[in-house]
């Protein structure tokens, strides 16, 4: 039972995970369809029955996981354990709080279990490279975000002084909001400059936006290059990884590292 539920290395385990993913997708679709009023008015009863059937199946599955887990408490406190529990609660809460039904879409997080079925374990190394690159560049990214925040405050304040309340910039926070929307090239258009000077500043902000978007990409890309290079320098003797680019010997066993072209 544990092998079928928690592993995907057997035919039964893969079949169970595929069934579970199908049930999760069906449940999410039912919740989405129920939010469409014409569909809900015509098929409301069928959608409600289908949702309860799936909820009962998910409840049985959650209890089965607790029953056969090697450490039920550890599973219940794990990420998937919490997600599994939250995915079963909304339908029961509807009895007391009808608006809680929409929370059933949290079941989509359980699709992460598909990683086991699709054999994505081979990509764990690439995921680790990405995560280590993000961690290594966190200080640079933090400085960059602080600089962008400062820039938006300055630009928002400037536009508040230039445009004024008559043109929709009725406060500095409103100006900061416009600066963020313009700098990120989103451009909602709900607040727009009308004076020639304000439009000139808007053009500068738009041009700066394209350059600013590329900065964090370059920072993370550079860190990924360094991290990937380190991962390629595996020791041929003990398989130790993560050596510095200029390292000549393995930090674990002392064997000379091969040069990488």
Image (tube, rainbow, N blue to C red):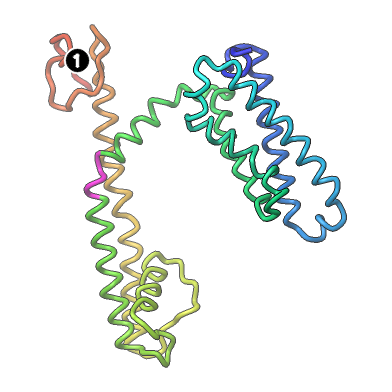
Residue found at the very far bottom of the displayed protein:
166
Q: Measured from the top left, where is residue 251 in percent x and y?
A: 15, 16
Image quadrant assignment for residue 3? top right
Part of the protein shown in magenta: 136-140
Q: Measured from the top left, where is residue 245 in percent x and y?
A: 17, 27
> Which of the two residues, 156 or 239, is positioned nearer the viewer here?
156
Query: Is residue 1 magenta-colored?
Result: no
Residue found at the very far right of the displayed protein:
42
Q: Measured from the top left, where is residue 209 in percent x and y?
A: 34, 65
> Which of the two residues, 208 or 89, is positioned nearer the viewer here?
89
Query: Which residue is label 1 attached to?
Result: 258
Whether 185 is drawn above or below 93: the answer is: below
User: What residue do we see at 47% from left, 22% from top?
Assistant: 121
User: What residue do we see at 40% from left, 31% from top?
Assistant: 127
Residues packed near mark 1 inside 10 Å, few (<14), some (14 to 19) or many (20 plus): some
The quarter in which the C terminus is drawn is top left
User: What residue do we see at 36% from left, 83% from top?
Assistant: 171
Q: Main secondary structure of the magenta part?
A: helix
Q: Specify whether 89 is left or right of 255.
A: right
Whether 189 is drawn above or below 102: the answer is: below
Q: Measured from the top left, where is residue 41 in percent x and y?
A: 84, 58
> Which of the two residues, 198 or 80, is positioned nearer the viewer here?
80
User: What residue do we see at 33% from left, 72% from top?
Assistant: 205
Element at badge 1? Answer: loop
Q: Specify whether 220 is left or right of 251.
A: right
The quarter in which the N terminus is drawn is top right
Image quadrant assignment for residue 191? bottom left
Residue found at the very far top of the displayed protein:
237
């Amino acid at each position: 039972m544990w092998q079928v539920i928690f592993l995907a290395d057997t035919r039964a385990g893969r079949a169970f995970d595929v069934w579970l993913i199908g049930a999760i997708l069906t449940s999410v679709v039912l919740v989405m369809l129920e939010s469409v009023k014409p569909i809900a008015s015509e098929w409301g009863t069928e959608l409600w029955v289908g949702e309860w059937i799936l909820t009962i199946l998910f409840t049985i599955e959650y209890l089965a996981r607790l029953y056969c887990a090697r450490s039920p408490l550890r599973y219940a406190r794990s990420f998937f354990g919490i997600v599994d529990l939250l995915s079963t609660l909304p339908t029961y809460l509807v009895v007391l709080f009808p608006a809680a039904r929409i929370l059933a879409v949290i079941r989509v997080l359980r699709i992460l279990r598909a990683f086991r079925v699709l054999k994505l374990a081979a990509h764990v190394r690439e995921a680790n490279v990405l995560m280590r690159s993000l961690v290594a560049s966190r200080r640079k990214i933090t400085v960059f975000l602080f600089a962008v925040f400062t820039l938006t405050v300055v630009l928002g304040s400037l536009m508040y002084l230039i445009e004024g309340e008559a043109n929709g910039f009725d406060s500095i926070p409103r100006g900061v909001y416009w600066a963020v929307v313009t700098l990120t090239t989103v451009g909602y258009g709900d607040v727009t400059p009308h004076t020639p000077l304000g439009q000139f500043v808007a053009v500068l902000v738009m041009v700066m936006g394209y350059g600013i978007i590329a900065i964090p990409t370059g920072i993370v890309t550079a860190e990924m290059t360094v991290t990937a290079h380190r991962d390629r320098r595996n020791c041929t003797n003990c398989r130790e990884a993560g050596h510095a680019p200029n390292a000549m010997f393995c930090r674990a066993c002392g064997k000379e590292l091969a040069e990488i072209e």
